[in-house]
C-alpha cells in the first residue's frame, strides 16, 4: 500500500488516506452565508475521495472579513449552510474540516479577480462595496495602498478571543470533525506574531514571548471549545520571507507552545505578511514542494505531525514526501481545482486502485470497462 493511501489518526478521528483538500477561498458568499457555488464545489472535490476536505476560512467576526465574499461563522444563522457542507464531505467518506480566522489588518479587500488590493471607489460604484477599517496588532498598513488598521485594545482582544471561541463551538455544532485555526498570511493572528506587523510596546509586543501571547490565548480558547475528542490544526506562515520577519526558528518555538496547549497538527505555509500570499511576486521563492522543508523542520524539532502544502502536484512527489518522513498529510489546493479527482487519479498512478474500485460506482463501472477494452478504430487513430 502506498503511504499516501494509509489511514492517519488524530485523537478520535481517522482520515482514510493522507490527502487533504486545502481550504481554498471561493470569495462567493453573501453576508457570510454559503450558497449553491459552495455546495457544488465541495461536492466536486469530495467525490474525488480525499481523506479530508477543509472548508475555506470562515471568519469569526463580521468586521474580520477579508472580502465581502468571505464565508462566515460569526452567527448561528450560518450553521445550516455549513452543516450542509460537512454532511456532503462525510457522505463521500472524507473527514469534514473547517478553517476559522479573522483578516485583521487585511480586511476590506477586493476579490482576487477584481484587483486583489484594497477596496476603492470603483468597487463602491460598481458593486456597492464600501471599505471599512480593520483592527490589527499595530496601526501599520499592509503596504502604502492600504488604510492603516486601528490598533487592537485590551477590550478588542477579549472580544476577539470570545469570537474565536464561539466560532469553534459553531464549527463543532455544524458537524466538522477537525478545526483549523488560521495564523498565517498576514491576517490577524499572524500580524501579532510577526515583528514586521507588530510594533506594540505592551504585553503583546516586543519579545517573541509577548508576540505569541495573544495567538496562544486564542488557541487555548479554540482548544477548549472543540473538546477533548476532536483534533485541532493551526496553519502557520512558517516564515515571513522578509528581513527582520518571522523565521522558521520562531515557528519551531511557537509550535512547541501550541503542542503544549493541545494542538494536534501544524499546517505549514509561508509568506503574506506584506501583501497577498498568492501574489505573483512573493517573498518566498516558489517551486514544487517549496514549503515542505518547513513541515519537515517543525515535525522533526517539535515531534508533532505536520501538513505539507505548496505546489505538490504529482502523486509520486506526494508519496516521496511521506516516505521520507517530511510530513504526515499532503494538502492539495489549486491542483484540486484543475483536477477534483486528484486523489483517485493518484491511486491509479501509484498502482493502488487498478480496477477503479475507489471511484464512485457511477464512474468506476464505466472506467473499468473502458480500461479493459482496446480503443475502437476510427479515422483519427490511423
Image: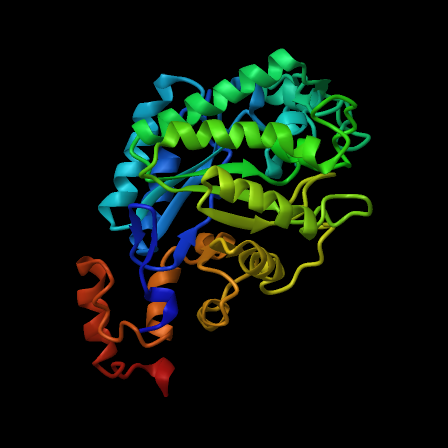
When asked about the image quadrant of residue 106, the answer is top right
Q: Nearer the viewer, residue 260 or 243?
A: 260
Query: As displayed, is residue 281 above or below residue 382?
Result: above
Residue 372, image quadrant: bottom left
Q: Is residue 289 above or below residue 94?
A: below
Give left or right: position of 353 versus 231. Answer: left
Residue 211 visible in the picture? yes
User: For this rendering, which residue is in front, 55 or 69?
Assistant: 55
In this picture, residue 330 sits left or right of residue 17:
right
As drawn, 214 above or below 90:
above
Viewport quadrant of the N terminus: bottom left
**Residue positioned 65% across, 16% down in the render:** 132
- Residue 64 location (% of width, % of height): 57, 23
Q: Name the outermost residue toward the front.
A: 260
Judging depth in this view, the residue of 343 and 207 nearest the camera is: 207
Quarter in which the C terminus is drawn: bottom left
Tell me: 14 left or right of 156. left
Q: Residue furthest bottom?
A: 382
Q: Which residue is most to the top? A: 155
In percent of width and height, residue 25 lies at 50, 39
Question: Residue at 75% across / 32% down in the picture?
Answer: 197
Q: Is residue 188 visible?
A: no
Amino acid at each position: 500500500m502506498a503511504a499516501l493511501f494509509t489511514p492517519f489518526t488524530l485523537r478520535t478521528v481517522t482520515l482514510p488516506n493522507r490527502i487533504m483538500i486545502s481550504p481554498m477561498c471561493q470569495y462567493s458568499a453573501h453576508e457570510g452565508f454559503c450558497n449553491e457555488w459552495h455546495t457544488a464545489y465541495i461536492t466536486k472535490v469530495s467525490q474525488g475521495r480525499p481523506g479530508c476536505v477543509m472548508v475555506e476560512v470562515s471568519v469569526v467576526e463580521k468586521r474580520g472579513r477579508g472580502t465581502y465574499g468571505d464565508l462566515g461563522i460569526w452567527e448561528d444563522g450560518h450553521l445550516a449552510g455549513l452543516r450542509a457542507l460537512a454532511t456532503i464531505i462525510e457522505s463521500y467518506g472524507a473527514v469534514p474540516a473547517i478553517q476559522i480566522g479573522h483578516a485583521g489588518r487585511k480586511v476590506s479587500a477586493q476579490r482576487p479577480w477584481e484587483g486583489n488590493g484594497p477596496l476603492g471607489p470603483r468597487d463602491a460604484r460598481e458593486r456597492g462595496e464600501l471599505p471599512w477599517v480593520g483592527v490589527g496588532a499595530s496601526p501599520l498598513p499592509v503596504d502604502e495602498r492600504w488604510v492603516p488598521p486601528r490598533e487592537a485594545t485590551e477590550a478588542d482582544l477579549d472580544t476577539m478571543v470570545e469570537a474565536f471561541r464561539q466560532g469553534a463551538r459553531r464549527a463543532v455544532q455544524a458537524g466538522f470533525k477537525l478545526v483549523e485555526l488560521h495564523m498565517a498570511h498576514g491576517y490577524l493572528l499572524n500580524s501579532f506574531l510577526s515583528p514586521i506587523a507588530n510594533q506594540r510596546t505592551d504585553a503583546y509586543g516586543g519579545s517573541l514571548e509577548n508576540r505569541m501571547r495573544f495567538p496562544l490565548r486564542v488557541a487555548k480558547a479554540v482548544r477548549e471549545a472543540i473538546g477533548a475528542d476532536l483534533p485541532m490544526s493551526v496553519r502557520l506562515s512558517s516564515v515571513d520571507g522578509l528581513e527582520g520577519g518571522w523565521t522558521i526558528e520562531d515557528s519551531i518555538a511557537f509550535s512547541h507552545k501550541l503542542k503544549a496547549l493541545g494542538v494536534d497538527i501544524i499546517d505549514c505555509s509561508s509568506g503574506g505578511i506584506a501583501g497577498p500570499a498568492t501574489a505573483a511576486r512573493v517573498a518566498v521563492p516558489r517551486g514544487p514542494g517549496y514549503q515542505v522543508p518547513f513541515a519537515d523542520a517543525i515535525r522533526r524539532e517539535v515531534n508533532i505531525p505536520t501538513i505539507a502544502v505548496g505546489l505538490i502536484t504529482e502523486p509520486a512527489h506526494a508519496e516521496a514526501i511521506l516516505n521520507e518522513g517530511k510530513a504526515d498529510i499532503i494538502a492539495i489546493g489549486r491542483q484540486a481545482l484543475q483536477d477534483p479527482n486528484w486523489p483517485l487519479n493518484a491511486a491509479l498512478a501509484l498502482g493502488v486502485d487498478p480496477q477503479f474500485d475507489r471511484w464512485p460506482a457511477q464512474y468506476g463501472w464505466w472506467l473499468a470497462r473502458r480500461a479493459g477494452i482496446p480503443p475502437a478504430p476510427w479515422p483519427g487513430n490511423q
